[in-house]
Image (cartoon, helix red, strand yellow):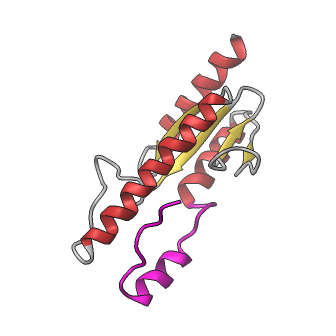
Amino acid sequence: MDHPPTPLDTATSARLRRQPRSGTKPEVTLRRELHRRGLRFRVNHPGLPGRPDIALTRVKVAVFVDGCFWHRCPEHGTLPHTNREWWQAKFDRNVDRDRAKDNALGELGWHVLHVWEHEPTESAADRVETEWRRRVMS
């Protein structure tokens, strides 16, 4: 498996390791809203490719709450000026990994939804609930 090059300085490396990987504010807010609406789910389901942030197992809907910085949001994604080549490789790898996990979940019959961290909670929950209802009714 190819890995992006190691960052040039140890401070950057340490800072990246401290970034939360799950339980971020946008994830928790969305989970609370979905639970309030009566939807039940698993969090960071370990048995699925990519460990979805939210897995509605009954209807096979996997939800990922993507950070704008890390996942190349078309509205808010930025490329740092320092060490640009390293960051470009890092972001490209993140996007490739996202596509691979989406494909793997699709092959298992799962529908994948991506929610940007900036998306209003109500509209994100509406999208998830709409897909949940569509799959329950079919």
Q: Position of residue 110 (x, y in %)?
A: 65, 29
Q: Position of residue 112 (x, y in %)?
A: 57, 34
Q: Residue at x 38, y 59 (%)?
A: 91
Q: Looking at this rendering, what residue extends furthest in the front direction?
A: 1
Dominant secondary-structure state across the stretch colored magenta: loop
Give the camera-side residue of 38 and 9. Answer: 9
Q: Quadrant of residue 12?
A: bottom left
Left or right: 17 with respect to 6? right
Q: Position of residue 106 (x, y in %)?
A: 60, 30
Give the camera-side residue of 113 and 12. Answer: 12
Q: Quadrant of residue 135?
A: top right
Is residue 69 in sight in this rendering? Answer: no
Total labels drawn? 0
Q: Looking at this rendering, what residue extends furthest in the left direction?
A: 81
Q: Residue at x 48, y 42 (%)?
A: 99
Looking at the rendered image, the quarter that the C terminus falls into is top right
Q: Residue at x 68, y 30 (%)?
A: 108
In this rendering, is residue 44 above or below 138? below
Give the camera-side residue of 121 and 138. Answer: 138
Q: Looking at this rendering, what residue extends furthest in the top direction?
A: 138
* 22 drawn magenta: yes
- The magenta region covers 1-24
Is residue 65 in sight in this rendering? Answer: yes
* 14 drawn magenta: yes
Left or right: 27 with respect to 89? right
Q: Residue at x 65, y 25 (%)?
A: 132
Q: Position of residue 11 (x, y in %)?
A: 43, 88
In this rendering, is residue 29 above or below 41? below
Left or right: 45 with respect to 5? right
